[in-house]
Every structure is written in structure tokens, then in C-alpha cells.
Amino acid sequence: MLYSLICGLLALATLWSVVNATVLTSDTFENSPCMKFFYKNQELTGFEGYNYARICQTFRDRYYFASLYDKDRRIPLYSASLFNYKDPLDKETDMSNEHWKYEPQLADPSQKGNMQQIDSKVKDDPIVKQSQPVEIDYNKVYQNVKYTRGHLNPNSYMGSKSSKASTFTVTNAPPQPRGFNQEQWRNAENKILGLLNNKCHVVSGVIPYQVEKWIPDNTARRVAVPEFVWMAYCCPDHQPPTGAVLGHSDGSKTVTVGEGADKLQFKPAETKEIEVHQLEAILSSRLQPKNHISIFKDGCT
């Protein structure tokens, strides 16, 4: 009896620690506050890595979306959200905040989970810099390209001042060439924006280069530059209920991605509207996971 009681208490303690953590050390989002951001409460499958962090993006003690963060490349691999989401505690009187932020718990697990604003002290902190690209100067030109922080979960897709502010974190913003982010990718985001409603789940992510490309230079592997950016949506009451877009952010060359019937050729800085199953096949082809990548449970049916 006593043994059963102890086991039950330990199980509750474990569940509490997972639910209240915003950087999960486990290999799943299960039992976390951010499961609601995934369609039918099932996170993406096939994204496997020993050095990934699962982040429940938290601002002002409220959860807004989920990100899978690659601690080696120091970029998010994807961010998942509900369209036009706002927390029940959000108020019209909340202050807007578009300052860039970082996740303290990635650097120090004892820290509270709320994302914090990046300041000069943070930029010089070697432990924080090891965990996140807080100090990258995007006014500089790297490898003949001017980059910017490109939101995966767009602030325009969120429903309140606080939820919009939560998207301004480096764990939601891999580097993108500035022109591509402000033109081709913005146009793709705006086109999808017109299709969405409050029942839609949205997941955005990246595909790294096969031969890794880094900022600030080839010798200092500070933050990886993705070759592709993608977005997929699941709207159960739409017809069709799903859609996706894949963008080739590199503005210097033509490239082919995928295999067989799913093979596509992209011109520099080109975006293409594709089916979700085609995107999943391309991701599986490039990332070579143990299990096939699935973005939405049951294909969003």
C-alpha cells in the first residue's frame, strides 16, 4: 500500500514537473501545456535528434506556441501554433513588445521559463551564447548576404499583443536572407493568411543545407542558415483541409529537392505551393529520419 502511494506521488511529481517546464528535457511534448497547439494533440513525428529542446514558448507566464529547437545548429526546426491564438488572460491593455528575446532555461535549467529581453549583458554571457545566437549582428553582411531573423510562427498570425510579442524570440527565428524574408516569404505568408480561421493549426519549419552554411563565417559555427523554409496548415472545416508552401531561401542558385514523384526544382528565392504529403516526403528525403515525417495526425482528416 505504501509502495503504491509513493509510486503514485512520484508519478504526479514527474507530471507536474513536465507540465510546469517550458523547456522539456524529454523526447516528447506529451503532457506539456503546448500539446493543444498540435492537431489532435499529436506532435510531429519523425523529428529525431539527441540534442533537441522542446520549448513551450512562454511570455508573461502564458503559453503561446511550441518550438522544436536544435541546440547544435542554434535554430528552431519548427514552430507549431493555433491561428489567431490568444491566452484567456490576455488583455487589450497589455503592452506591445517587439524587442528580441531569448529562453533563459536553455542556458540554465534553474531559471524560470518566461522568455526575457536580450540586452548587452546577455550578449556577453558565454553560457547564454553557447545555447542561443543572442549576439548576432544582422546589420552586417555575412558571406555576401544580408540576413535577418525570420519568424517561423509569424506575429501576424497571432491574436493579441502578448501573443504577437511572444514570436519575437530567437528560438522562433532562424536566419533568412533579408530580401527573401521581406518579399517572397512574406507574400507566401500573406496568401495563406487569407485562408485561415481560428480552428486552423499552423506549423512552420526549415530544412538545413546538406553542406551546412553558418553565420557569421565558415570557421565560427555560431548559427546555421537554413536552405528552405516551409509552412503547413490544417483546417478541418476547409475543403481541402490542408495545404503547404515550400520556399528556397538561397538567392544564388537553382536546386532540386525530393525524390521520384515528389522531386521539385527551385530557382533562387522561389516559393511553391505544394501538398502536405509532398512536403512530408521532401522533409523525409532531406532529413533522413528513422521514421517517416508526419506533420498532422491522420493527414488532418
Image (cartoon, rainbow, N blue to C red):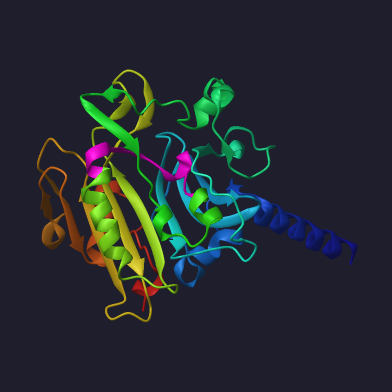
Q: Is residue 88 magenta?
A: no
Q: Position of residue 141 (x, y in %)?
A: 27, 24
**Which of the 4 quarters of the picture holds residue 212?**
top left
Seen at 27% across and 24% down, the residue is 142
Quadrant where the C terminus sits is bottom left
**Closest to the observer, 62 or 76:** 62
Left or right of 132? Residue 214 is left
Q: Is residue 174 left or right of residue 87?
A: left
Left or right of 220, for residue 20: right
Residue at image position (43%, 33%) is 72
> Is residue 32 visible from the viewing direction of this image?
no
Residue 136 falls in which quadrant of the image?
top left
Residue 13 in which image quadrant? bottom right
Q: Measuring from the top left, give residue 166's x and y in whole percent.
A: 52, 49
Number of numbered discs on residues: 0
Identify the residue shown where x is 12% and y is 62%: 261
Image quarter (top left, top right, bottom left or bottom right) of the N terminus: bottom right
Instruction: Report the span colored magenta.
Output: 167-180
In the rendered view, tell whether residue 290 sits above or below residue 198. above
| Vertical comparison of 145 with 219: above or below | below
Question: Residue 29: x and y, percent?
Answer: 54, 57
**Rendering coords of residue 183 (x, y %):** 22, 47
